Amino acid sequence: MAYVIIGNSAAGIAAAEAIRKINKKEPLIMISDEPYRAYSRCLTTYYLERTVAEEYMYLRPPDFYSRLGIDLKTGRKVTAVNPQVKEVITGDGERFSYSKLLIATGASPKFPDLPGINYNGVFGMRTLDDAKNVAAVAAPGKKALVLGGGLVSLKTAAALCKIEVDVTVLVSSDRIMSRVLDKMSAAIIESELTGMGVKILKETTVASIEGNNGVVKGVQLATGEYFPADFVIVGKGVKPNTAFLKDSGLVSEAGEPLQINMRQETALVDIYAAGDVALSYDLLEEKYTHNAIWPNATEQGAVAGLNMAGVNKEYPGSISMNSAVFGKLSVIAAGITCPRGDDYWVIADYKSGKGVYKKLVLDDDRLVGYILTGDTSRAGLYTALIRSKRRIKNTEKLFTGQGRSFVNLSEINTV
């Protein structure tokens, strides 16, 4: 019997390291459907724009697995888990018995149900192989259409623009990154992107992906407008990689995230889950939700690994967060950024011409969210205040004048 980890990214690596801090002897098997050792998915767009070489994407040195006594199985796709006999089964029929199992299979791009979605030349942008496939067709003067205005879509569009691809982003909502940014911050980032050469069309509905002999040729909108393209990038969110668990009793359908408790345990004994494949406890919403970001995956993986090794450890919870750099403009948004109703106070400050916009969201006397563009230097402080749920004394100091002035939280006493 052995510890078995399915997945070789942020959560899986953190779990393996945590296990080995406690138990250095029991066999540890990691199974990955990718051919690589662990790498940073956050760097795939930098690889695409040719500013980060593949050798610098890897999270650990080549001898990492041997030093920790990890038996890494690459290029193996797990097709089933049998909890009754505690076995993991791969596509080639190989079976691995486990004493404790961690599911850290991450998530995959969510492809909309559109005619032509399976044509050659339609890509997601999640893995190193995705980046390599896009890089193989991306060249100066080529036309690319990016479907979706989320973070990955925009980072991909910016990367393509840097290598002189003609890029158009088609966004269904009235602004980019609409789930996390307000209109002001979205407009600032859009201005930066358009200044780089990225074209952005908002409030568009894609009707179909058009092609010839199974190869993409363009995209048609619901209005009938047609945009030619040499390739298409789909960035419409992600879905957990749980299809192989349908017969295990853990999920009822493919793409359903795994339910876990504060120890990262699933409903089945000795089976844990961490990272983008699982729900995580949201400190602000006070419920389990899908905060699929790299830091959460790492922290969840470490907690899972400790519990698998016999240490009683609870996951402290997460908050939603997005961060990126577009051109010379940095942006971070965390927590509740676009509140609705009268239960929140909002303070904002905008320095026109500098791209500096700061917005704080408070629930009574607690900070619950922020957006920073252009100047993200205090993001760590604000994040710590949100996570700690500390009350801020003298909150009236935040609402000088008409309640629109920005005051540094470092100047306010906290308890």
Image: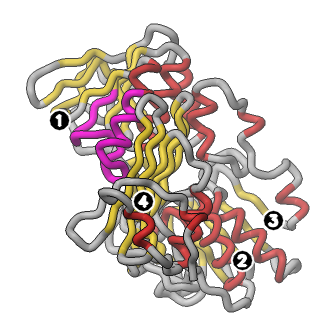
Amino acid type of the residue that numbered disc 3 sits on in the rendered structure = Ile
Which region shows up in magenta? 169-191
Is residue 258 among the parts visible in the rendering?
A: no
Kindly identify the amino acid type of the residue bearing the numbered disc 1: Thr
Q: Amino acid at mark 2?
A: Tyr
> How far across and down, in percent of the image, does residue 363 sit?
36, 74
Residue 228 x %, y %: 27, 15
* Label located before the other in sequence (4 or 1): 1
Q: Earlier in the sequence, mark 2 or mark 3?
A: 2
Instruction: Name the residue nearer the viewer: 22 or 367.
Output: 367
Callouts 4 and 2 close, C-beta under 8 Å? no
Report the residue marked by disc 1. 205
Which of pointers 1 and 3 indicates the residue nearer the eye? 1
**Which quarter of the image is occupied by the C terminus?**
bottom right
At numbered mark 3, what does the secondary structure look like: helix, strand or loop? strand
- Give residue 33's mark: none
Residue 360 marker: 4
Q: Is residue 184 magenta?
A: yes
